[in-house]
């Protein structure tokens, strides 16, 4: 299991991307014992951004007894998770890629936008349920 990728994935699932250390440790323990699939997935994602370092690259910040993912961290995670249409290329450096400089912005397909919206709603719903469960 790749610790760096796991932390990014956990933080992005929380409201505002913030989790206190106890929640982070609990979620990390759950994922660490979830089987080989998670370990293989995080290893594959980490291979797309070698040299990943959460704090020195500004992907995560320490706040009020917890950690928060930054916008740069969200961008790097999105880059790692992006499906490639061509075969695996050489691993890229651990920097956020520059968007192509074109006159027209890149538009997502309606299906992709809908899928991303659904995923965001599901993450928010799961986060609200975690908060409710922890409150009771």
Image (spheres, grey):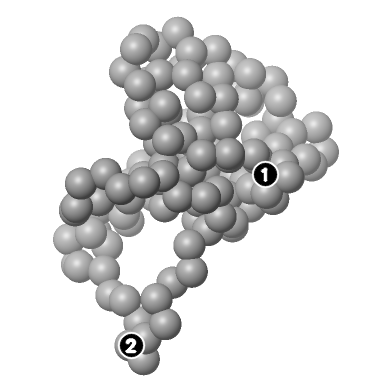
Q: Secondary structure at mark 1?
A: strand
Quadrant location, the C terminus: top right
Find numbered disc 2 in the image and state the secondary structure of the residue it sits on: loop
Which is more toward the observer, 88 or 115? 88
* CB under 8 Å between discs 2 and 1: no
Q: Position of residue 84 (x, y in %)?
A: 25, 51
Residue 82 numbered mark, or none = none
| First of labels 2, 1 by sequence position | 1
Comparing 75 with 127, the one in front is 75
Residue 112 lies left or right of residue 104; in this view the side is left
Reading the image, the residue beneath label 1 is 60
User: Which residue is denoted by mark 2 in the rendering?
Assistant: 104
As rendered, which of 113 and 6 lies closer to the eye?
A: 6
The percent position of residue 65, horizontal first and vertical second, equals 80, 32
Q: Is residue 75 visible?
A: yes
Q: Is residue 9 above or below residue 57?
A: above
Residue 14 visible? The answer is no
């Amino acid at each position: 299991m790749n610790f760096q990728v796991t932390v990014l994935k956990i933080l992005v699932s929380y409201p505002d991307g913030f989790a206190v250390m106890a929640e982070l440790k609990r979620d990390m323990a759950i994922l660490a014992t979830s089987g080989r699939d998670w370990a293989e997935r995080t290893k594959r994602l980490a291979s797309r951004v070698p040299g990943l370092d959460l704090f020195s690259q500004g992907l995560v910040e320490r706040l009020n007894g917890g950690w928060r993912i930054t916008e740069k961290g969200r961008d790097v995670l999105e880059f790692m998770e992006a499906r490639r249409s061509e075969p695996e290329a050489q691993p890229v450096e651990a920097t956020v890629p520059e968007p192509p400089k074109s006159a027209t912005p890149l538009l997502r397909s309606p299906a992709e936008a809908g899928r991303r919206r659904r995923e965001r709603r599901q993450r928010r719903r799961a986060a609200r349920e975690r908060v409710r469960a922890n409150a009771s």
